Image: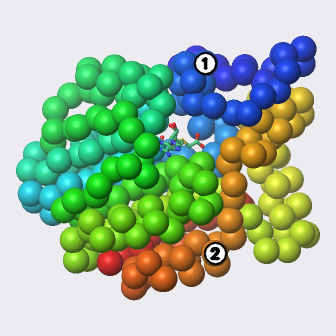
């Protein structure tokens, strides 16, 4: 696994974060050292898919990056009788996903699509995963995207939504941010790397509060909405149609 040193060089000018070749080449290391619980969430996506995905249906991995969730779904599948649709609009990520999945055994078929998830029509979905992807979609487009997902789901369909969240008050926001930075420091990131990455993400990753997420999911039509994982400002929700 290549180590993420993208923000270690103090001389380099910090520009907006993009999912390019440089990011794709260090992505597993970057996400594991930056997102608390990432491995647990990936494993649970596989477990949930094995329980919830119906024969003949589709299982979507939206913003699939290198395909970690797709691989977990495929590896945990009891049968090959459903289609996994994995979508990402970063060509570098999709190329990486294609290579990553190619030599990782058998399972249900996977359709890899290089596209914006806002342009994808969801059909016959028994499960949809948005694992730390919605936060990169412009805020105004989040409701229409979730509405499309809801409409394309089968009854009882499951949405797994993981997000970095904003806290409703300044004190908790500060506390959770410090805890997150402590998490990153313990995994070898320097103060400089943490602050440079933070600046790069500032206008790119737009977090919302947990109540904003749950209210929107209700508005779109989901009935059961529960948080199943939280580690400071990182949350994963389940929403059932
Ligand atoms: C994982 N889910 O490993 N359309 C398509 N893809 C997009 C869009 C969009 N509009 N916006 C962002 N992406 C993965 C991790 S990473 C999370 C997801 C992170 C893609 C983007 O190219 C990137 O690959 C992914 O969403 C977000 O379980 O880096 O924090």
Residue bearing mark 2: 212
Q: Which mark is residue 22?
A: 1
Determine the image quadrant of residue 22. top right
Left or right: residue 196 compared with residue 73: right
Instruction: Report the residue at 41% width, 23% height from top.
Output: 96
Question: Left of 106 or right of it: where is 161?
Answer: right
Asked if 135 appears above or below 229 in the picture, the reply is above
Q: Secondary structure at mark 2?
A: helix
Nearest to the observer: residue 203 or residue 162: 203
Q: Is residue 228 above or below residue 81?
A: below
Residue shown at 48% from the left, 31% from the top = 90
Query: Who's the residue at 43% across and 43% down the image?
Result: 116
Looking at the picture, how far across and down is residue 156, in whole percent?
25, 76
Residue 99 visible at all: yes
In the image, 234 versus 59, the foreground residue is: 59
- The CA span between labels 2 and 1 is 33 Å
């Amino acid at each position: 696994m290549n180590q993420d040193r993208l923000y270690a060089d103090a001389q380099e000018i910090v520009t907006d974060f993009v999912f390019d070749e440089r990011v794709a080449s260090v992505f597993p290391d970057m996400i594991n050292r930056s997102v608390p619980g990432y491995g647990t969430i990936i494993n649970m996506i596989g477990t949930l898919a094995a329980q919830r995905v119906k024969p003949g249906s589709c299982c979507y991995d939206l913003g699939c990056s290198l395909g970690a969730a797709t691989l977990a779904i495929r590896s945990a599948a009891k049968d090959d009788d459903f289609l996994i649709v994995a979508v990402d609009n970063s060509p570098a990520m999709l190329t990486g996903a294609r290579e990553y999945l190619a030599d990782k055994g058998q399972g249900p078929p996977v359709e890899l699509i290089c596209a914006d998830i806002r342009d994808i029509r969801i059909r016959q979905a028994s499960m949809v995963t948005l694992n730390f992807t919605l936060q990169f979609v412009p805020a105004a487009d989040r409701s229409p995207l979730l509405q499309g997902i809801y409409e394309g789901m089968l009854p009882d369909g499951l949405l797994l939504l993981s997000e970095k969240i904003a806290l409703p008050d300044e004190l908790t926001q500060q506390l959770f941010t410090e805890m997150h930075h402590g998490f990153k420091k313990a995994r070898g990131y320097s103060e400089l790397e943490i602050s440079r990455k933070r600046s790069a993400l500032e206008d790119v990753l737009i977090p919302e509060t947990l109540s904003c997420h749950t209210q929107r999911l209700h508005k779109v039509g989901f009935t059961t909405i529960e948080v199943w994982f939280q580690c400071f400002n990182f949350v994963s929700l389940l929403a059932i149609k």
